[in-house]
Image (tube, grey):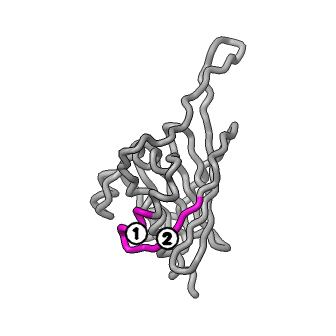
Amino acid sequence: MSIKRFFIPLAAVALLLTAGCRSQRDAARTQPATPVDSGTGMTVSPRYYTTNFTCSAQGMTATGQIRMAADSIIWLSASKVIELGRVRFTPDSAIIYAKVMGRCFRGTYDDLYRRFHYRTSFKDISETVTSDDAPELLSSLARQFGIAATFTLEPWKRVDQLTFPFAVPDNVNPL
């Protein structure tokens, strides 16, 4: 079974996250930053969150990690023995790097809609991945696109600091 064949469901996962979900339910949100006394007065410390996920589709399973800095960045990496790809969302842009295919998308959410015909926003994505119903929402959304996928997310953990590595070679083709 080739790694490129396996990447199709993983690319679907990335696209599902970009598609977001406009659920009428109140989504669980990240906690706002908390004031911290730095000795010179009150400052705001950023909040970082991380979770691991598993996606099963077409008889294959991949794992990954989602990292988030509240209100500023969502980063996703998916692997199956090797890293398959990464996705990074900020409030004004999206980057999807299909590493095993050597392809990348960079642009705004309007560019994302023009390229993939999925309308979403940073807020929609954030609400979807932090929702208590995230696995069910993502599985349901996958079914709408004809993909029988199941998702499992571990509970979100708050951490003091994270990195959001994202290097894309200059010679990649557009996704």
Nearest the camera: 175 or 142? 142
Is residue 71 in the magenta section? no
Which percent across, then down, holds residue 145?
36, 70
The residue carrying mark 2 is: 149
Within 10 Å of the Cα at label 2, are there few (<14), some (14-19), or many (20+) other Cα atoms? Answer: many
Say which residue appears at 51% left-offset and 82% top-offset.
5
Kindly identify the amino acid type of the residue bearing the numbered disc 2. Answer: Ala
Give the distance between the C-alpha atoms of the residues marked 2 and 1, in whole angstroms: 7 Å
Number of marks present in the image shown? 2
In the rendered image, the quadrant that contains the N terminus is: bottom right
CB under 8 Å between discs 2 and 1: yes
In the rendered image, the quadrant that contains the C terminus is: bottom left
Which percent across, then down, holds residue 101?
50, 75
Q: Earlier in the sequence, mark 2 or mark 1?
A: 1
Which percent across, then down, holds residue 102?
50, 72
Say which residue appears at 63% left-offset and 51% top-offset.
51
Q: Is residue 58 above or below residue 74?
A: below
Say which residue appears at 59% left-offset and 56% top-offset.
153
Side (left or right) of 64 relative to 57:
right
Q: Secondary structure at mark 1?
A: helix
Which percent across, then down, holds residue 4?
52, 80
Q: Is residue 171 above or below residue 135?
A: below
The region drawn magenta spans 140-152
* Furthest residue in direction bottom, as rendered: 1
Side (left or right) of 152 relative to 104:
right
Q: Secondary structure at mark 2?
A: strand
Q: Is residue 117 above or below residue 130?
A: below
The residue carrying mark 1 is: 143
Say which residue appears at 30% left-offset and 57% top-offset.
113
